[in-house]
Image (tube, rainbow, N blue to C red):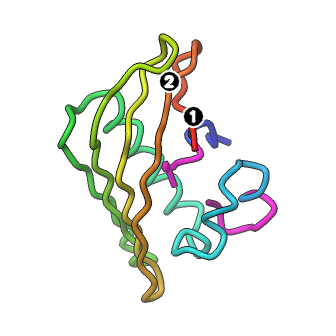
Amino acid sequence: MHLRLSVLVLVFASIAVPLTVHASNMRFLEFSPSAFFTEKDWELLRTAARDLLDNHKDGESMSWKNEESGYNGKLTVLRTYEDFGTTCRRLRVFSDAIEVSATRLVNMCKNKEGVWKILN
């Protein structure tokens, strides 16, 4: 499973199953809109996050929407910085599901294997 981004995603970015949320170090999202996300929602979020983190400048955003569930979100790169020689990016992550919306700030850093990981 591509939980490397844990995104999110941010982000990154939890998974609908609380145990997965805990395992992916994103327990803070357990009671957020992302707790209702389907696997397709997560894949759309991860794809948007990877593209945004790898290919877009500070200030740029990417939105995603699952036409089946109606759930959606928007990711915005706030800034890029170095942390102990590692490239990191601060994101604003908005998500919306079942009339529940939330915005979080997430720091992501790229590890030596080139995978983005949540810092906070």
Residue 13 placement (x, y as % from top left):
52, 55
Q: Secondary structure at mark 2?
A: strand
25 lies left or right of 46 = right
Which quadrant of the view contains residue 88?
top left
Q: Looking at the image, which residue is at 41% across and 36% down?
A: 50
Disc 2: which residue? 110
For the residue marked with disc 1, what is the amino acid?
Answer: Lys
Residue 16 lies in the magenta-colored region? yes
Query: Which residues make up the magenta segment?
Result: 6-20
The local secondary structure at tag 1 comes to strand
Residue situated furthest front in the rendering:
84
Q: Disc 2 marks which amino acid?
A: Lys
Q: Quadrant of the N terminus?
A: top right
Task: Look at 20% across and 32% down and name the residue there.
Answer: 57
Q: Please report whichever mark, 1 or 2, sits nearer to the chain's N-terminal start.
A: 2
Q: Quadrant of residue 93?
A: bottom left
Q: Residue at x 23, y 33 (%)?
A: 56
On screen, 34 above or below 11? below
Count residues near mark 2 (Cα–Cα under 10 Å), then give few for <14, some for 14-19, many for 20+: some
In the picture of the structure, the residue carrying the numbered disc 1 is: 117
Predominant secondary structure in magenta?
loop
**On the picture, is 15 further left or further right than 84?**
right
Label 1 Cα crowd, 10 Å radius (few <14 / some 14-19 / many 20+): many
Picture coordinates of residue 120 (x, y %)?
Answer: 58, 44
Q: CA distance from mark 1 to mark 2?
A: 6 Å
Which residue occupies 57% across, 34% down?
A: 117
Is residue 74 or residue 59 the one in the foreground? 59
- Mark 1 and mark 2 residues within 8 Å of each other at the beta carbon: yes
For residue 25: magenta?
Answer: no
